[in-house]
Image (cartoon, rainbow, N blue to C red):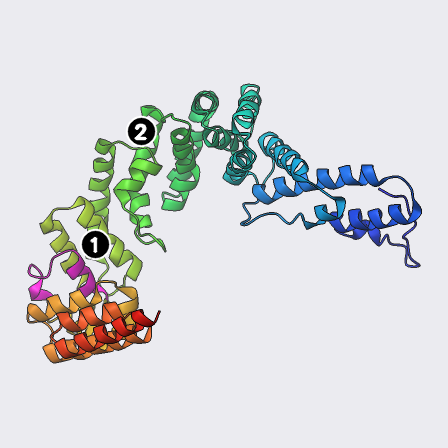
Amino acid sequence: MVEQKTNCKNNFDIVKNLPTASRLLYDKVLAEKNGSGQGGALREAAINHAIRTYADHYQCGRSGEPNVEFLKKFDANGEDMVRIKKGAVNELIRELDNQHHEEYGSTGAVKLAKEIGWLPGATKEAAAYLDAFDVKGTPPGIIQRAIGMANAFGLTDAAWRIGNAYLKENETREIDRAAERLKQKPDWYTLNEHYGWLARFARDCGNTLTDDSKEKILPYVADAVVHYCDCRGADGSVGKILKEEFGFDEKEIQSVASDAKAKLIAKMSEHKEEVLTRTFTESIIRFFAEFGTKQELEDAFKLLVNDDADGNYIIMPLLIAEHGMMERLRDLAPKLASCLEHLVANPDMWRRQEANYPKVLKDYMKAGLLDPVKVRNAIIRVIEADLHDGKLGEAAMLAGEFGMPYEAEKISEIQRALERLA
């Protein structure tokens, strides 16, 4: 940098507090003005700053390209850009302890290496770095980043070696710690935070946790599954999560499901006047659809729809239709009268929340549980909304399905005319 006096009367350095790129450009202006001959050194500093800029950009997982416009003022050329990207790749490979690194740095390194045709060389650099990587005493987060980098570069043997070394040294301690936490608080968050990460870690490096480890955790999983059913955003298959995220086999999953099923039945039987959340209601039905028989699913619906449910469980008709239980649960119709009325009276709300809303209305109408006139009026509002959104094809199809051939043809005619003008 060009040496200069920049302190003002209030004794703070103005130039020192500028962004690095701005400071480099200002130093360049001063160097040219003073004829100091530092242009080459400043150009080198600008290239080094660009390397750091690229590395930071990908470490943080930012979208787009990093801002290196300042390089134009230093006459950076294509060779310089190759050097910059190669330098950034090397920094990304060697900075696993950077708190932002995670998976972004690894994928960024691969992306940059591909851009400059240096993927084989970058892979060789990554392999050399990982060969010297010492697992002992290294925090789990950095271990995970090392495995992420190995996987990003296709170095599966390195991922397995690092992961296996870490598990060999730490699995028993981490599992005992997780079991102790779950003993105190057997909920989904505790299971995921203290056990799930280790199971995913083992999976990502091509390993599995030992049967002894899983045996220590299994007694707490059913309670955690019950808690998961009441977690906001719980919309995944429990079986899939237990298998893919937590590494349990089919026998272990069925054992957990059996225990969780009994706990959920007890909870539903006891809820009485307690209004269960929408998430919990949906999750219970999803769980029994996945792990229960048709009879158990039917019983679950009946337990949820108690005398106080009318009006509280407005989603129940949708769930019944989704799981094909309409005929088996016809006797619940009187208890769900206001729910069905809400369904047909609020098409603006339900069409956004339920993709199969028109089909659900049609099915209930065919079953004799909804007034055809009310269904027709609801569908007209859906068609109007589709027209307003420019979805002419969907509007025409609905009109045709619900006995409005004139409207269907007219909408199609308008659609064809607009397409010709496009």
| Residue under the image location 30 percent in, 48 percent down | 236
Q: Is residue 333 visible?
A: no
Nearest the camera: 61 or 209? 61
Q: Which residues are magenta?
A: 315-332
Residue at the spot x=87%, y=47% of the render?
Answer: 32
Compared to residue 230, the image places residue 367 above or below, namely below
Q: Earlier in the sequence, mark 2 or mark 1?
A: 2
Q: Which residue is mark 2?
A: 215
Q: Amino acid at mark 2?
A: Glu
Which residue type carries mark 1?
Ile
Q: CA distance from mark 2 to mark 1?
A: 28 Å
User: Quadrant of the image for the C terminus?
Assistant: bottom left
Q: Is residue 47 left or right of residue 255?
A: right
Q: Is residue 219 above or below residue 63?
A: above
Judge by depth and name the residue closer to the eye, 197 or 255: 197
Q: Regarding mark 2 in the picture, which secondary structure is present there?
A: helix
Q: Is residue 156 magenta?
A: no
- Residue 69: % across, % down: 68, 50
x and y percentages locating residue 35 in the rendered image: 92, 44
Q: Which residue is mark 1?
A: 285
Q: In this rendering, would 271 be left or right of 233?
A: left
Q: Is residue 269 left or right of residue 116?
A: left
Q: Secondary structure at mark 1?
A: helix
Vertical side of 10 occupied by 21: above or below: above
| Res 414 quadrant in image | bottom left
